[in-house]
Image (cartoon, rainbow, N blue to C red):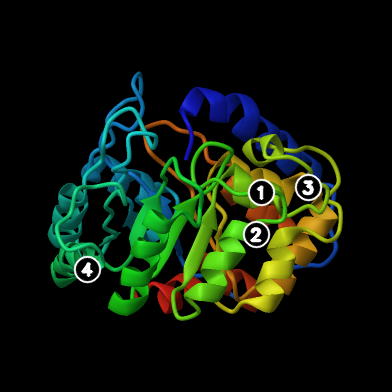
Amino acid sequence: MSPISRRQMLGYSAGMLAAGWLNSVNPGQAEESKKLPPFIDVHTHIGTTWNGNKELTPDDLIKWMDEHNIERSVLLPLVSPESSSFLLLTEPALQAAKDHPDRFTAFCSIDPRTSVRGGVKGFKSIIQSYVDKGAKGFGEHKVGLPFDDPLMMQIYEVLEDVGIPILFHMDSQRGIDEPGLPRLEHALATFPELDFIGHGPGWWASISGDIKTKKDLGTYPKGGVVEGGAIDRLMEKYPNIYGDMSAGSGNNAIARDPEFGRQFLIRRQDRLMFGTDYLQPGQGVPQFETLAAMKLPYDVEVKIRRKNAERVIDI
């Protein structure tokens, strides 16, 4: 998730254009005789995220969900100073999920640099207390550290032990990695029982095999996707890595090369989850148009719309 002004400039405007190109692509008709089920949105935020944004209340979010055929949204806290202008704490997300159990699922989060007594045991006591109150996952994990920094690895150790997935943000400043994502791979290999859900420019730029520098991991690349991207390689090798299609970065990755994007969705149909990163009233979300234009087989679209989220997040 990024400041809305930048997203509009780099992500959503480009995504809308790309979605327009998709309208001319018709590689196969969806099974129109079957009515598609409502979405589960794995990435939203309540509160005020960036200075200058409008506050998004739980009631605002539910109204928007009803308008867009979204049955349930995952509420993600943001607790690291690099993650947003204002901290979005775990407690309001848990309370909203308690007030609207049929519409919201809450995640929890804690910055790995937090002063905690007892190291890993201390972090586990805090995270377990959130799980006991209803948290179903951890994130948005959006921290200004290398992805496999020892402090970050402590959190992953706890989450694998507790048994909840982590939704992470990656770019050139947060969840920092190298081209090819070796730091993420280190974490995937070290904690094979922990499900990682990737999000952000660094993750989604890595759909293409032409990422050369750290700076590239903070961009929204345009044009054709080059075979051999880190995402496909990691998904082939590790069963515990998934993708969250939210924000400008997620939409851009699929829409920038419609033919590749459609085949990627089909190829990785068991690893991808619909998300929007909706965080303020009136925000544009191109994912609906992009996904519809792909004309996916019915079973594939249902997995992406909701079934993968139901399984991985235990909804």
N-terminal of the pair, mark 3 or mark 1, is: 3
Q: Which mark is residue 182?
A: 2
Residue at the extreme top: 52
At label 1, counting other C-alpha atoms closer than 10 Å, the crowd grade (few under 14, some 14-19, many 20 or more) is many
Instruction: Determine whether label 2 and label 1 are within 8 Å by CB.
Output: yes
Residue 279: image x %, image y %? 38, 38
- To which quarter of the image does residue 218 belong? top right
At label 4, counting other C-alpha atoms closer than 10 Å, the crowd grade (few under 14, some 14-19, many 20 or more) is some
The residue under the point 50% across, 79% down is 192
Determine the secondary structure under disc 1: loop
Residue 196: image x %, image y %? 49, 66
- To which quarter of the image does residue 263 belong? bottom right
Amino acid type, label 1: Glu
N-terminal of the pair, mark 4 or mark 3, is: 3
Amino acid type, label 4: Lys
N-terminal of the pair, mark 3 or mark 2, is: 3
Q: Where is 280 relative to 262, above or below?
A: above
- To which quarter of the image does residue 222 belong? top right
Q: Which mark is residue 124?
A: 4
